[in-house]
Amino acid sequence: MSADAVNLAGKLALFREHWQPRTVAQLNDYDVMVVKVKGEFVWHKHDDTDDFFLVLAGRIQIRLRDRVVALGPGELFVVPRGVEHQPFAEEEAHVLLIEPRGTPNTGDATTAQPRRVV
Amino acid sequence: MSADAVNLAGKLALFREHWQPRTVAQLNDYDVMVVKVKGEFVWHKHDDTDDFFLVLAGRIQIRLRDRVVALGPGELFVVPRGVEHQPFAEEEAHVLLIEPRGTPNTGDATTAQPRRVV
């Protein structure tokens, strides 16, 4: 590893909170984030953007209104814009997220977590 | 895994060629791709976009004119737009790439690999 490399496990070791994404890099006007998840997140949707999930460790479900997408390590899913979804993890899981900068994680700026950088 | 989940190792098992990215998902107007790399790629730059690399397996170097960024599994680097770089891998490595759709992988449409979907 060199100074420029972003080690995702190293970034994840810096915090413990669930559902609080940390920005680890930027790609054009997108934030690349890591997040620890456990339990149920709120049902929400993003009208203006797709929503990228790549599982790094553990297992998650992305519940959609008509089905459930189950993801393990090395598996990704892109929730299309406008599609309601509820992330869920029975045990703690670690996920890479990519979203346009400023996208509220709940789909609603009034309830969203602030963007944090690690 | 469900039908919607994209299993990256499964996608990588579908081809053997080096330096020929395969699109596995789309995020807004970006292609999410997997690629097998070995040896040296050409020096190139993208004037209009950053260039995202996440190593899934093996080790790569991203040589820049002033330094080398070494990446192993679970490590990522975003090459800023306009910065010349040469990806290199001593042994075969597997990488997740994210770039705006239509970005030529060599930085030059006349020498670029066509975008393939798996």
Image: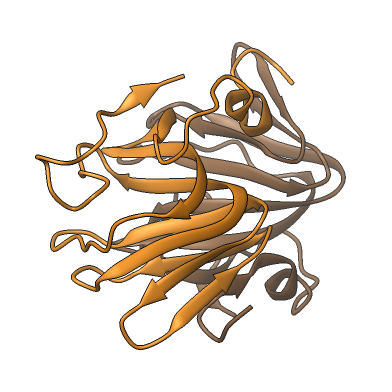
Chain colours: A orange, B brown
Please, is residue A31 above or below residue B9 in the view?
above
Please, is residue B84 above or below residue A53 in the view?
above
Q: Image check: A57 left or right of A115? A: right
Q: Position of residue B4 (x, y in %)?
A: 50, 81
Q: Farthest residue in the left direction?
A: A110
Q: Image check: B25 left or right of B62? A: left
Q: Quadrant of residue A47?
A: bottom left
Numbered label tally: 0
Residue at the location (19% across, 60% down)? A46
The N terminus of chain B lies in which quarter of the figure?
bottom right
Please, is residue A116 above or below residue B3 in the view?
above
Residue at the location (22% across, 68% down)? A81
Q: Image check: B18 left or right of A17? A: right
Q: Farthest residue in the right direction?
A: B91
Q: Position of residue B11 (x, y in %)?
A: 68, 74
Q: Position of residue B36 (x, y in %)?
A: 74, 59
The C terminus of chain B lies in which quarter of the figure?
bottom right
Residue at the location (13% across, 49% down)? A108
Task: Judge by depth and name the residue closer to the eye, B28 or A71.
Answer: A71
Task: Judge by depth and name the residue closer to the eye, B17 or A86.
Answer: A86
Task: Judge by depth and name the residue closer to the eye, B80 or A102.
Answer: A102
Residue at the location (73% across, 69% down)? B12
Q: Is residue A80 visible?
A: yes
Q: Position of residue B111 (x, y in %)?
A: 53, 58
